[in-house]
Image (cartoon, rainbow, N blue to C red):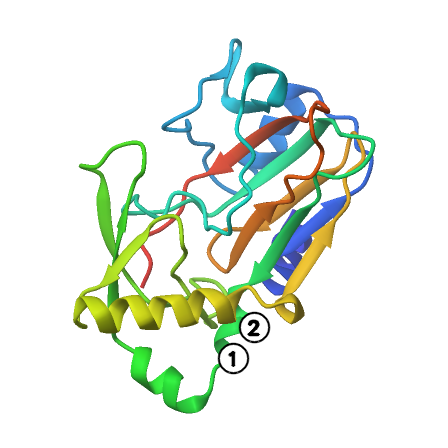
Amino acid sequence: MAEVRRALVEHQILIFPRQTLSPEQHIEFASQFGVPEIHPTREGAADHPEIFIIDTADGAPTAEWWHTDMTALPAPPLGSILHMQISPESGGDTEWASQTAAYEHLPRDVQERIQGLRAVHKAWWDPEMQSVHPVVRKHPESGLRSLFVNGIFTQRILELSETESDDLLQYLYAHSTQERFTHRHAWQAGDVAFWDNRSTQHRVENDFGEARRRIHRVTLTGDIPQ
């Protein structure tokens, strides 16, 4: 487990192909790395509330926009462990973008400009739920800096005017999701993905039409970004 955790921090996304996991094993594995949390917008499995199910057969939306999970929370998740149950024959790939690499490849003047800036993140499911996080966060385990803004939750940068904030955020969104910072995974049933939510964004390719896509996912509680 220590080796897996070191690999997660270093590589930010781990793929374990074609695994057979019961719900109990999924939760047990996840619990080695943190505390499974109950998702604020999705109902968990009947006997395993730590597992929330994303099933297009039940009308679950496809998360096709780049985002970091639940950054409107004061302490966004550490990461998630996804177990693919039913995968389309083609399409439905997931992409992850390293926000550490994105930060490292910013021009030096932009790095200097965004140090110390803070942004408001607001929940789409609850307008009263919002948090303020640094635009650049320091990873609590590696100590590396990464961008920590995303187009789903981030509303504005507090220290800038509305126009300046919008311009800078649009620049950072475009920069942080360039192909050179990304990994794309084509799913097979059974695949397990474990990603570090503290240093990545992700999205799903919504190109599989009416095909069914069913996922079991456990998300781990995180820390307050610094």
Q: Which residue is mark 2?
A: 101
Q: Going 43% across and 44% down the picture, which residue do you hit? A: 77
**Residue 95 numbered tag:** none
Q: From this view, report whether residue 205 is shown above or below residue 216.
A: below
Disc 2 residue crowd, few under 14, some 14–19, many 20+, Cα 10 Å: some
Q: Is residue 11 left or right of residue 202?
A: right
**Residue 104 numbered tag:** 1
Q: Quick one: which residue is furthest to the bottom in this view?
A: 109
- Pick the front one: 112 or 206: 206
Disc 1 residue crowd, few under 14, some 14–19, many 20+, Cα 10 Å: some
Q: Are marks 1 and 2 in contact (CB under 8 Å)?
A: yes
Q: From this view, report whether residue 177 is shown above or below residue 131.
A: below
Q: Going 40% across and 54% down the picture, which residue do you hit? A: 151
Q: Is residue 85 left or right of residue 96?
A: right
Which quadrant of the figure contains the C terminus?
Answer: bottom left
- Pick the front one: 27 or 84: 84
